[in-house]
Image: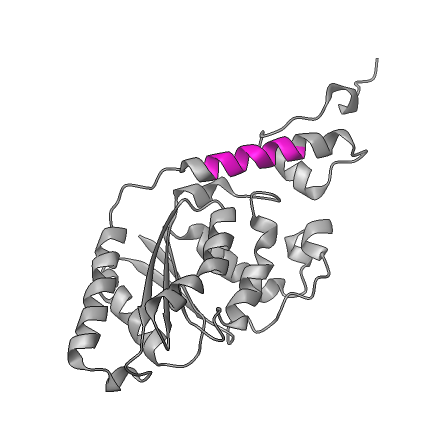
Amino acid sequence: MNIAVIIGTEAKGCTYSIKEAFLKPLRGGNEIVEYTLPKDMPHACIGCKACFMKGTEKCPHAPLVMPIWDSIAKADLLVIAAPVYGLGIPSALKALLDHFCVRWMVHRPELIMNSKRAVVLTNCVGPFFIARAAQRDIMNSLSWMGISKISRNSVGLIEGIVWEELSEKRRTKIVSKVQSLAARCSANNPPRKNLKTRAAFFACKLMHKAALKSEEIPSLDNRHWIDNGWIKLPEEKMPRSAS
């Protein structure tokens, strides 16, 4: 199994320890590639729209973004681990996810995403439901990329913020929970595309068909949909053979 891991902090604290606990039962026999933010992709999206208008390879940050995307595309399991900063995810992680908006179903989806699993691991100083609420941006991004099977674990650290200072009982409980989740993710059967993903894809298909009618030249988004056979050029816009 190929596993891509994105961790939203360079600190080797609670997030790192929880991520390591999750990966421990998966390290044998699986290929794991890890990216640490912001070290491996320190740039925010600047809104230049080059990815939409010219192609993803024209993104000014493509040399850093594309290797991460290629690892995600290759992976059977995507793991995102992040602390909670200011009731939300770290800015470096949000910046990376912003670069992937062009891969959403509303733009240029890759159907290979439908066969992937994803796991979101978050922790916060406070009750667990804050850590869970902070997962919204990650969950939305993964869902719009077409990943149907997304599991998540949220840890509230009311009793302390330093992993080594947590009680052994507390650390054992956290480790047991994430390793149980890891065991479920190691199943060989690929997930099915769920109803929510099917409905979103169908709605996007209708939108692209309608947009195509008003375009003299298909946009890159619509060209992607045409090339994949999801929509067709209207007859009046098809090239005419020389008579």
Question: Residue 43, how many percent across, how many down?
Answer: 61, 71
Q: Nearer the viewer, residue 150 or 133?
A: 133
Q: Is residue 97 above or below residue 232?
A: below
Q: Is residue 77 above or below residue 28?
A: above
- The reply to whether residue 227 is visible in this rendering is no
Q: Residue furthest right?
A: 243
The residue at the point 61 percent across, 51 percent down is: 102
- Secondary structure, magenta segment, majority class: helix
Q: What range is drawn magenta here? A: 197-208
Question: Residue 22, how many percent across, how many down?
Answer: 27, 65
Residue 206 lies in the magenta stretch: yes
Question: Residue 37, how many percent across, how many down?
Answer: 48, 73
Direction from residue 30 to residue 120 in the image, left or right:
right
Quadrant of the image for the C terminus?
top right
The residue at the point 54 percent across, 66 percent down is: 94
Q: Choose top left, top right, bottom left or bottom right for residue 9.
A: bottom left
Q: Nearer the viewer, residue 57 or 131?
A: 131
